[in-house]
Every structure is written in structure tokens, then in C-alpha cells.
Image (cartoon, helix red, strand yellow):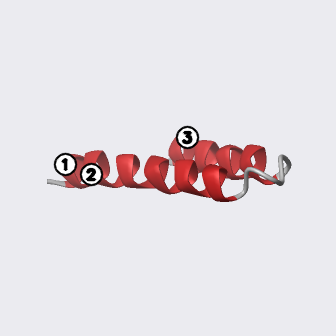
């Protein structure tokens, strides 16, 4: 069951990141930092 929850959570995180990218299209410095943090979190899991 835990694997199913992870499979559901990861796409949600990706969608949130994409939405933040579209909203923060003016600031080009924020998206890379967000992606870096998410990548490190996935690596830890």
C-alpha cells in the first residue's frame, strides 16, 4: 500500500512544481531551487 501512496504523491508534487513554474515565470531563479529541493527529497526517500 505504501508504494501505491508514493505513486500517487509524486505526480501531485510534479504538478505543483509545474504550476509554480507557470505562476513564477517572471522570476527565473525560483524554479531551479524548487526542483533541486524536490530532487533531494526523492533521493532521500
Give whichever of 12, 41 is nearer the camera: 12
In the picture, measured across the screen, residue 32 lies left or right of residue 3, that is: right
**Residue 25: image location, x then y, percent:** 73, 50
Give whichever of 38, 17 is nearer the camera: 17
Number of the label disc, if any, that sits on residue 43: 3
* Contact? badges 3 and 1 (CB < 8 Å): no
Number of the label disc, if any, that sits on residue 8: 2
Q: Secondary structure at mark 3?
A: helix
For label 1, the crowd category at 10 Å Cα-Cα, with few meaning under 14, some 14 to 19 and many 20 or more, is few
In the picture, measured across the screen, residue 22 lies left or right of residue 9, that is: right
Number of the label disc, if any, that sits on residue 4: 1
Q: Secondary structure at mark 1?
A: helix
Q: CA distance from mark 3 to mark 2?
A: 17 Å
Comes first in the chain, label 3 or label 2: 2
Number of the label disc, if any, that sits on residue 17: none
Q: At x 81% / y 53%, what residue is drawn?
A: 26
**Residue 8: image location, x then y, percent:** 27, 51
Give whichever of 27, 7 is nearer the camera: 27
Comes first in the chain, label 3 or label 1: 1
Q: Secondary structure at mark 2?
A: helix
**Residue 20: image location, x then y, percent:** 61, 57
In the picture, measured across the screen, residue 19 lies left or right of residue 12, that is: right
* Contact? badges 2 and 1 (CB < 8 Å): yes
Q: At x 34% / y 55%, what residue is drawn?
A: 9
Amino acid at each position: 500500500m505504501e508504494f501505491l501512496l508514493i505513486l500517487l504523491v509524486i505526480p501531485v508534487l510534479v504538478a505543483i512544481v509545474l504550476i509554480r513554474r507557470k505562476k513564477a515565470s517572471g522570476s527565473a531563479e525560483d524554479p531551479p531551487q524548487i526542483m533541486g529541493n524536490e530532487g533531494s527529497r526523492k533521493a532521500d526517500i
